[in-house]
């Protein structure tokens, strides 16, 4: 795929003054709004899944969200490394917290 040339930014006034450009802008906006609606629907579905995992399994919703993020990003290795570094830092910085 060839690199796209970056089009020079123009004022909204000049876009709205051109009927063809105004029509294209409205088409882009309509499609973006439809995308946002689909995203909102999917976010609601995820919320339902999180609530079901909490109700049926007793899983903390925050942990569910974190697991979804790790799974979605396929970041298992990076997350393990981050957790390990955080655990090490906590042990060194707050050794008294182990006794609480």
Image: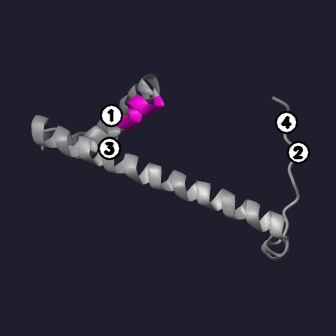
Task: Name the residue: 86% across, 49% down.
Answer: 6
Q: Dividing the picture into quarters, in which one does residue 19 lie? A: bottom right
Q: Earlier in the sequence, mark 1 or mark 2?
A: 2
Q: CA distance from mark 1 to mark 3?
A: 12 Å
Mark nearest the camera among 1 and 3 is 3
> Few, some or many C-alpha atoms within 10 Å of disc 3 (few <14, some 14-19, many ≥20)?
some
Of pointers 1 and 3, the one earlier in the residue sequence: 3
Q: Are marks 3 and 2 in contact (CB under 8 Å)?
A: no
Q: In which image quadrant can residue 23 be found?
A: bottom right
Residue where numbered disc 2 is placed: 5
Work out whether mark 4 precedes mark 3 in sequence or the reverse, and give the earlier one: 4
Q: Which residue is mark 4?
A: 3
Residue 26 % position (x, y): 68, 64
User: What span is in magenta?
Assistant: 68-73
Residue 46, numbered label:
3
Label 4 sits on a secondary structure element that is loop
Left or right of residue 99: residue 62? right
Q: Is residue 81 left or right of residue 54?
A: right
């Amino acid at each position: 795929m060839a690199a796209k040339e970056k089009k020079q930014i123009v004022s909204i006034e000049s876009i709205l003054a051109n009927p063809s450009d105004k029509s294209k802008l409205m088409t882009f906006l309509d499609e973006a709004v439809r995308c946002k609606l689909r995203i909102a629907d999917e976010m609601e579905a995820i919320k339902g899944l999180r609530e079901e995992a909490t109700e049926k399994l007793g899983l903390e919703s925050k942990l569910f969200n974190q697991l979804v993020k790790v799974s979605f990003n396929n970041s298992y290795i990076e997350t393990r490394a981050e957790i390990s570094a955080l655990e090490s830092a906590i042990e060194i910085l707050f050794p008294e917290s182990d006794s609480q």
